[in-house]
Amino acid sequence: MKGNEFEGKVIGITRPAERIAEAVNIVEAHGGKAFIAPTLELQVSNSQSLKNLCKMAGKLDWLIFTSPTAIISLFKHCNDLKERLSPDCKIAVIGPRTGKFLEEKGLKVDMVPEDYTAEGLLEVYQGLELNNKLIGLPRTLSARDSLPAGLEKMGAHVFIAEAYKSELPENKDNVENLIKNIINGKIDAVTFTSTLTVQNLLEIAKEEDKERLLEKFRNGNVAVAAIGPVTARPLKEQGIPVLIPEEYTVKAMLEKLMNYMN
């Protein structure tokens, strides 16, 4: 990439405020303008299940992290997690970014799937003996059930701890402005990094604006990029053409978008 692929383009970023920096930096480094409109708000949880996970850390055979937010939350309420975990406990993460975050906390990553999705994790676990293994899974309760359900089918006992909540943003002004600018032709592309970022955008859209918004997406007036096929699914269900990278990362998604726009 030569550095000006987004020259004069306005790119909508819908991911949570805590996770926007990478996308904004890439867009601006390539000459574009990032329109920041988080459709999702993450709130660290002080749940009883998270406290229980901390207490049972020494009994875990596996600990799985599917986001940096889950790591932040668990360490906030279990700052001696490293000492509590058994030396035999292995740790899996959904992707390299989450893995890097964990290693900064002083814990070693044992497994990262090639496909950075719940399905990718399950594929790796297929070759392992999980019968009666105890697996800790801190996450938001709004996440899909495919991962814990798949692990339990393999014979594992999965303890899900609510590490954070995924909510609609309390202040919806930026999202409403994004919708208005999409309809008025002032946005060139919009990026999505989870199914909730898609669903919440459509939920926040006023009834009279929703069809006009969808039409802009459907007819290609506004390019739409999703981080992976799971995120793309609710968009495709609405008849929207979606750009999906081969590697499910923010960087790869934006590179795919750059190639398309050039």
Image (spheres, rainbow, N blue to C red):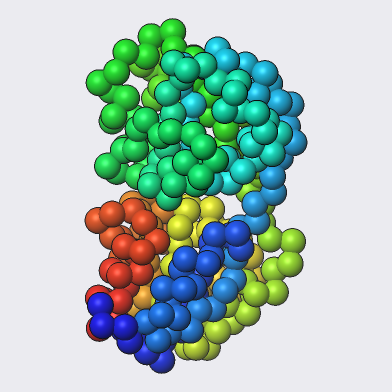
Kindly tell me whether residue 219 is visible in this rendering.
no
Q: In this picture, is 177 found above or below 106?
A: below
Q: In this picture, is 159 found above or below 113?
A: above
Which residue is more in the foreground, 208 or 244?
A: 244
Q: Which residue of the protein is positioned furthest toward the top in this rendering? A: 132
Which residue: 25% across, 21% down? 127
Count of numbered tags: 0
Give the image location of residue 111, x and y in percent. 35, 32
The answer to whether residue 223 is left or right of residue 170 is left
Q: In this picture, is 151 found above or below 245?
A: above
The answer to whether residue 229 is left or right of residue 75 is left
Which residue: 48% across, 52% down? 195
Which residue: 59% across, 82% down? 180
Which image quarter holds the N terminus? bottom left
The answer to whether residue 107 is left or right of residue 96 is right
Give the image location of residue 208, x and y in percent. 61, 75
Which image quarter holds the C terminus? bottom left
Q: In this picture, is 26 found above or below 153?
A: below
Kindly tell me whether residue 18 is visible in this rendering.
yes
Give the image location of residue 260, x and y in percent. 26, 76
Which residue: 47% across, 31% down? 64
Give the image location of residue 3, x and y in percent. 31, 83
Q: Which residue of the protein is positioned furthest toward the bottom in this rendering? A: 8
The quadrant where residue 99 appears: top left
